[in-house]
Amino acid sequence: MKHFGIIAEFDSPAAILSAAEKVRDAGYQRWDTFTPFPIHGMEKVMKLGNSLVGWVSLAMGAGAFLSVVGLIWYANAFDYPLIVGGKPMFSPPMTFVPAYIMMIMGGAVGALVGMLGLNQLPRLHHPLFANKNFALASRDKFFLAIGATDPKFSENETRKLLEEIGGVNIELVEDAD
């Protein structure tokens, strides 16, 4: 079995926030926190930027809009041109409503696809689920996990750091996948 990382348990929001700052300052890059509720300031400590889901949604919405406009233009101007009452073969105002509707649908699908893709879902099993205490992350405990793929990861040094910053129940997590 290969190592997934090391997980440590903390008792309070202040403790996990302080621990996160110390892990960041120690130079670790592949780490995450698991808490029963959002902790104000954690995103700044973890240096999390804006999600890319909005950009995926924008791209899919714009693509759907342009595709519908292009389809209507092609169908009316080339594929099956009908001259009705001297009206033009292509009229932008006429294409706006169906293209707008498809832009909304494309944006919604883009948000769903972007969220699933960027969160690496669906993943039916995660190595942290094997940790006996990890279920408490949705109740009253706070966890910090440092991934084994981190360039600074060393089983002994990482464990020592987590002990120094107040972590308890520190365990090496194995990845069966």
Image (cartoon, helix red, strand yellow):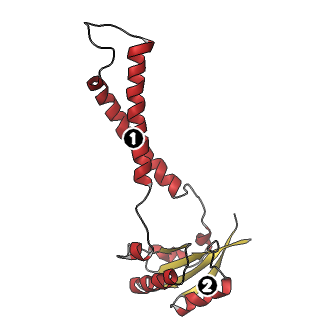
Label 1, secondary structure: give it.
helix
Number of the label disc, if any, that sits on residue 134 = none
How many labels, in total? Answer: 2
At horizontal 44% and vertical 72% (from top left) the residue drawn is: 47
Q: Quadrant of the N terminus?
A: bottom right
Q: Position of residue 132 (x, y in %)?
A: 59, 78
Whether residue 106 appears in this view of the structure is: no
Q: Is residue 134 above or below residue 57?
A: below
At horizontal 44% and vertical 48% (from top left) the residue drawn is: 56
- Mark 1 or mark 2, which is nearer the start of the sequence? 1
Left or right: 51 as drawn, with respect to 6: left
Q: Is residue 59 above or below residue 137?
A: above
Left or right: 86 as drawn, with respect to 45: left
Tag 2–tag 1 contact (CB < 8 Å): no
Work out whether residue 115 or residue 57 is closer to the camera in this orientation and state it: 57
At horizontal 35% and vertical 8% (from top left) the residue drawn is: 82
- Residue 106 sits in quarter: top left
Q: CA distance from mark 2 to mark 1?
A: 44 Å
Please name the amino acid that badge 1 sits on: Gly
Please name the amino acid that badge 2 sits on: Thr
Residue at the outermost right position: 1
Q: Position of residue 105 (x, y in %)?
A: 38, 39
Q: Which residue is mark 2?
A: 158
Q: Quadrant of the C terminus?
A: bottom right
At horizontal 33% and vertical 34% (from top left) the residue drawn is: 101
Q: Which residue is mark 1?
A: 61
Label 2, secondary structure: give it.
helix
Q: Is residue 148 above or below residue 11?
A: above
Left or right: 29 as drawn, with respect to 90: right
Q: Position of residue 168 (x, y in %)?
A: 54, 88
Work out whether residue 61 or residue 10 is closer to the camera in this orientation and state it: 61
